[in-house]
Amino acid sequence: MAELKNTFCWSFSQAKDFAACPRRYYWIRYGSWGGWEDMAPKGVKLAYRLKQMKNRFALAGIAVDLAIKDAVASLKSGREKTFEDALDYASSYLRKAWIEHMEGRWAGNPKRYVCIKEIYYGEFSPDDAEARNLWASSIKEKVETCLMNFFGMVLPKIRPLIAKGELVDLSDPDAVERESFALGGIKIYAMPDTVIVKDDSLSILDWKTGRPRQFYANQMETYGLWAQCRHEVPPDRIDLTLVYLPDGTCQKVEYGPEIARRTFNFIRESVQDISDKLVNGDIARNEPLMMENFAQTDKLEVCAHCNFMELCQRTFALKKE
Ligand code: SF4
């Protein structure tokens, strides 16, 4: 089998990681590369294992996402799922994640089996019933509310579009290449939740399980650029909507030629900042400078939510919260 190559690519979430902490970007993109190999150095294996870890926000987000995808796929094949079905689906993922962590198989196969960040870093003990219930109920409440709002608000809107075949299935294996576009020879990843194509216009609906943040709107703008570059849709025919599932609010995100230009410049500057940390700034070679060139953030509140505290020797950040 041909050797996997770590090629340079850009996505909004990678740019966010780099801006929050360049060292975090280093661990994700370079320090963990090859950590799946049996013969990988110990530090690389550890970085790879930490990278896969999930905290409670990620677990809730994945559970909601899986349940929604299952409900949409069922609807497409003519079977309607209820809110209760979706909740069962999400809960079974969460139960499985808990069991996987407790069985410890993630140590040998971190990609396949879940390791829970809060337990790994001792933020609560699974033997402490009160702390365990508090942790579990915060996830359960979020998942329930998000799914309730999806079934109450989003599904009624997309149901007729599914029936008319206007909803594009990005999870279709044949559509894999649709999740990226090229800009100046660089692969840019963009993967909206829902794409609706009608006549000559394209609408993107993206749902979030977190609270409203400006960077979600900026991420939507990169999806606008994706629609423009990948699907050749004119900017004035692109419609972007964010749905915040925890409170059910919708936010229209403006898009037009000026925003497209600004987004393009943002990507270009971000690529430049990142490539400054590469040997000779060479994106094609994509070899990082020494780790020390990727600065560590001095914001301990950022470290407290980061998977790489062990490698950065910053577990003390948890005590500062
Ligand atoms: S622990 Fe802190 S310094 Fe280290 S990668 Fe994470 S955010 Fe950056």
Image (cartoon, helix red, strand yellow):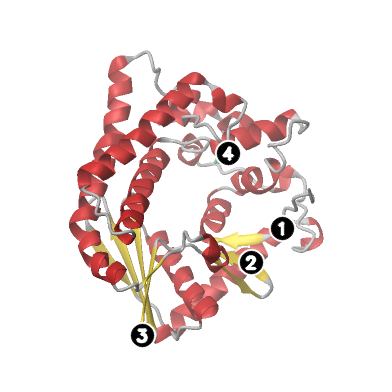
Viewer-nearest residue: 166 or 246:
166
Alpha-carbon distance for marks 3 and 1? 36 Å
Query: Which residue corresponds to mark 4?
Result: 51
Alpha-carbon distance for marks 3 and 4? 42 Å
Dot 3: what SS? loop
129 up-or-down from 223: above or below: above
For disc 1, the neighbor class at 10 Å (few under 14, some 14 to 19, many from 20) is: few
What's under tag 2, amino acid-wise? Lys
Which of the two discs, 3 and 1, sits closer to the camera? 3
Q: Which of marks 4 and 1 precedes in the sequence?
A: 1
User: Is the distance from the Cβ of mark 4 to the nearest ligand 1 atom less than 8 Å?
Assistant: no
Residue 7 marker? 1
User: Is the distance from the Cβ of mark 2 to the nearest ligand 1 atom less than 8 Å?
Assistant: no
Q: Which of marks 1 and 3 precedes in the sequence?
A: 1
What's under tag 1, amino acid-wise? Thr
Residue drawn 39% across the image and 86% down it = 200
Q: Which of marks 1 and 2 precedes in the sequence?
A: 1
User: Is the distance from the Cβ of mark 3 to the nearest ligand 1 atom less than 8 Å?
Assistant: no
Dot 2: what SS? strand
131 up-or-down from 172: above or below: above
Q: Is residue 20 visible?
A: yes
Whether label 2 touches label 1, CB < 8 Å: yes
150 up-or-down from 238: above or below: above
Ligand 1 sits in which quadrant?
top right
